[in-house]
Image: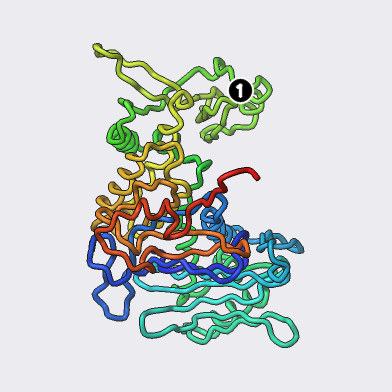
């Protein structure tokens, strides 16, 4: 679960900004939050809706979180600069470091992980265990007076001196352009050090809990899931019917490999030559069609593609369409619905940039309502950016779930909550937003002069 996210000096964000999933003192829609019985624990909201004009920076907020996720999981190459995009519209920020800090909950504990860095090196890095009453440092990495990196593990209880020496060895061997957390991930320290659950929790949160979906993101597991999991196809069809797409089924159809026209002959020859018996590959064609290819022991290629089934009017017959023949909205739902299907996996965090892209307003609203309904007993979250003003409805959503991003007079993105404004819970807020009362809406000139 995401508790809070802090960003400073990245893309359109200059000065430090905070996005929070900590609920305010609001009584409405109580089931929209996860409440913990222990007093020291922090309650967390399940839903976040972020508004902003075009180029306000709301997508940059999501990109910044993806940046730190990829930096943790993929790391950097030796003697290469960190691919950091600092704020460019103020010369002061070009020379200043960037800061990323993520507070999250994983496996029953709350943590704060963060780093301060420039495009050449990691200046600071830390992991804390946090609650309402205290912050306990688990590791802190800082530069000493000579510019060398030092890491302190003051609150990690090592089982043996050998384990402590090993983790210190990993820390000292971490390149200056690499995160220590990445080094732990890539070197599989869990096999050598036992009592480092906080470190493994942090890695697992970025790797397994956090899923970021952009408008161009395709659900890469569609073919595999349809091929290996019969229930997946049935569930996906059920959801597509719920969203009134007119679809009667989604299936994986076997086709003749030699008759696939949109794959060049040379590519086919390479596939036949390189694919090992019993292995599988996924190939994307030029017409947005994707094929699953497997090689049998006798060397023959079995090929499959996703087809959409529609019923013929006044008949028991059905016809199949290519997925690429479906509307942009239907294709978008095929990529988004697996997130709803994954809600049952506790502690998942789904972040969707431009939820309303290609979707009817009613479908965007239905998507959020389905998530809230499915997650009533599950600790999962959904955070979306959108332009869809019909979601600005306090009879359906909480004030503290709604956020706005806008650029100030210095061209820096700022983020703030609707809960910062003194408005009644029964207020119709959509018109106020469009009139610019809350910010985050475009301000257009009356003429070209």
The image quarter containing residue 428 is: bottom left
**Quadrant in which the N terminus is drawn:** bottom left
Q: Above or below — where is 159 with respect to 405?
A: below
Q: Above or below — where is 372 with respect to 16?
A: above
Q: Position of residue 61 (x, y in %)?
A: 53, 58
Label 1 Cα crowd, 10 Å radius (few <14 / some 14-19 / many 20+):
some
Q: Above or below — where is 19 with respect to 142?
A: above
Q: Is residue 109 visible?
A: yes
**Quadrant in which the C terminus is drawn:** top right
Picture mark count? 1
Is 444 situated left or right of 84 in this image? left
Mark 1, residue position: 263
Q: Position of residue 350 (x, y in %)?
A: 41, 53
Between residue 180 and residue 147, name the one nearer to us: 147
Q: Is residue 186 visible?
A: no
Coloring basis for residues: rainbow
Is 362 situated left or right of 436 in this image? left
The image quarter containing residue 361 is: top left
Q: Secondary structure at mark 1?
A: loop
Q: Position of residue 146 (x, y in %)?
A: 75, 85
Q: Position of residue 59 (x, y in %)?
A: 53, 53
Between residue 172 and residue 434, name the one nearer to us: 434
- Residue at image coords 56%, 25%: 287
- Residue at image coords 59%, 75%: 125
Between residue 251 and residue 57, name the one nearer to us: 57
């Amino acid at each position: 679960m995401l508790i809070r996210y802090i960003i400073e000096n990245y893309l359109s964000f200059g000065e430090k900004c905070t996005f929070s999933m900590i609920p305010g003192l609001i009584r409405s829609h109580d089931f929209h939050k996860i409440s913990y019985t222990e007093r020291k624990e922090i309650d967390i909201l399940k839903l976040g809706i972020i508004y902003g004009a075009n180029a306000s920076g709301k997508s940059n907020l999501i990109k910044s979180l993806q940046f730190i996720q990829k930096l943790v999981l993929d790391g950097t190459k030796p003697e290469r600069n960190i691919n950091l995009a600092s704020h460019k519209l103020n010369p002061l920020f070009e020379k200043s470091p960037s800061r990323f800090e993520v507070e999250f909950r994983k496996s029953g504990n709350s943590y704060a992980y963060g780093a301060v860095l420039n495009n050449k090196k990691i200046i600071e890095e830390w992991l804390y265990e946090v609650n309402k009453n205290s912050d306990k440092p688990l590791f802190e990495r800082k530069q000493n007076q000579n510019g060398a990196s030092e890491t302190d593990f003051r609150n990690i209880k090592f089982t043996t001196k050998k384990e402590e020496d090993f983790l210190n060895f990993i820390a000292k061997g971490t390149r200056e352009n690499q995160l220590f957390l990445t080094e732990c991930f890539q070197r599989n320290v869990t096999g050598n050090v036992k009592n480092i659950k906080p470190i493994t929790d942090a890695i697992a949160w970025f790797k397994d809990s956090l899923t970021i979906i952009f408008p161009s993101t395709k659900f890469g597991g569609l073919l595999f899931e349809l091929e290996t999991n019969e229930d997946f196809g049935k569930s996906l069809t059920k959801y597509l019917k719920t969203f009134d797409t007119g679809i009667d089924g989604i299936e994986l159809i076997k086709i003749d490999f030699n008759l696939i026209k949109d794959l060049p002959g040379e590519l086919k020859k390479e596939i036949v030559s390189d694919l090992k018996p019993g292995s599988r590959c996924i190939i994307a064609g030029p017409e947005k069609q994707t094929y699953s290819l497997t090689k049998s022991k006798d060397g023959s290629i079995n090929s499959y593609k996703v087809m959409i089934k529609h019923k013929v009017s006044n008949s028991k017959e059905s016809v199949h369409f290519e997925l690429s023949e479906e509307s942009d909205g239907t294709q978008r739902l095929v990529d988004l619905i697996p997130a709803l299907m994954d809600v049952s996996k506790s502690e998942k965090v789904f972040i969707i940039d431009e939820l309303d892209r290609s979707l009817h307003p009613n479908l965007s609203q239905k998507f959020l309502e389905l998530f809230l309904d499915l997650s009533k007993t599950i600790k999962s979250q959904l955070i979306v950016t959108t332009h869809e003003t019909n979601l600005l409805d306090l009879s359906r959503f909480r004030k503290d779930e709604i956020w706005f991003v806008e650029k100030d007079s210095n061209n820096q993105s700022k983020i703030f909550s609707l809960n910062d404004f003194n408005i009644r819970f029964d207020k119709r807020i959509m018109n106020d937003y469009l009139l610019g009362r809350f910010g985050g809406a475009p301000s257009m000139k009356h003429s070209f002069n």
